[in-house]
Image (cartoon, coloured by chain):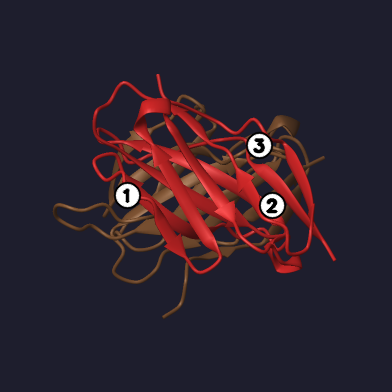
Chain colours: A red, B brown
Amino acid sequence: AQKVTQAQTEISVVEKEDVTLDCVYETRDTTYYLFWYKQPPSGELVFLIRRNSFDEQNEISGRYSWNFQKSTSSFNFTITASQVVDSAVYFCALRDSGTYKYIFGTGTRLKVLA
Amino acid sequence: DTGVSQNPRHKITKRGQNVTFRCDPISEHNRLYWYRQTLGQGPEFLTYFQNEAQLEKSRLLSDRFSAERPKGSFSTLEIQRTEQGDSAMYLCASSSLGAGWVSEQFFGPGTRLTVL
């Protein structure tokens, strides 16, 4: 069965601190896709990154970086030098190759304090 | 390029009434998805269309729920005989069909339903 676990319900950091959001997934499929979305207070989900199961390269985009490790079924997201505008709920999602639906985790609420 | 739009943004109804929501996907996106999100939870998949064909439905989609995408463009989600448990944010997303690669889903702002 597919499952996404985001064990951190809420994280608070002070501006400029680094923060890592954890995501652990379960799937029996050998080909799958992982995603991170941001949901700011306005409510609209914003796509951040997609990663294919056959591509374990980590990625950096500005202050954002992602660490994908198949051995531990984890796809963690790090924000470097956090800013108040990073405050939002962040969701990790999984899609198996045989379906188009996403399975979302329960989200991690990040609060960045000035 | 406009994003996914949903109407209405908010809907308050009394238990037992029928409601209908509309979603307009990004133009030329031929895949359209409906999700439901309750407070403190991630979105839960409801159904998916490729063009006008409804290809996948969740068990969450009870007989009171029906979705259509008649011309492969906009979609409607209808809930009949609403119940208080239907109160949630209903999200629509769309993606393009790309041979040999995966396209991410782009989400609309959602319709928040409150059933009194």
Q: Is A79 situated left or right of B95 in this image? A: right
Q: In terms of secondary structure, where does tag 2 sit?
A: strand
Real-space CA distance between mark 2 and mark 1, rounded to the nearest whole angstrom: 38 Å
Q: Nearer the viewer, mark 3 or mark 2?
A: 3
The residue labelled by disc 1 is A57
Instruction: Indicate the quadrant where residue B83 lies.
Output: top right
Q: In terms of secondary structure, where does tag 3 sit?
A: loop
Q: Which amino acid type is shown beneath numbered disc 3? A: Gln
What is the chain identity of the residue bearing mark 2? B
For the point 46% across and 24% down, the residue is B59
For the point 76% across and 36% down, the residue is B15
Mark 3 or mark 2, earlier in chain: 3
Residue B41, numbered label: 3
Q: Which amino acid type is shown beneath numbered disc 1? A: Gln
Q: Is B23 situated left or right of B81 in this image? A: left
The residue labelled by disc 2 is B112
Number of marks in the image? 3
Q: Residue furthest bottom?
A: B1
How far across and down, in percent of the image, does residue B24 sit?
45, 65
Real-space CA distance between mark 3 and mark 2, rounded to the nearest whole angstrom: 14 Å
Q: Nearer the viewer, residue A11 or B25?
A: A11
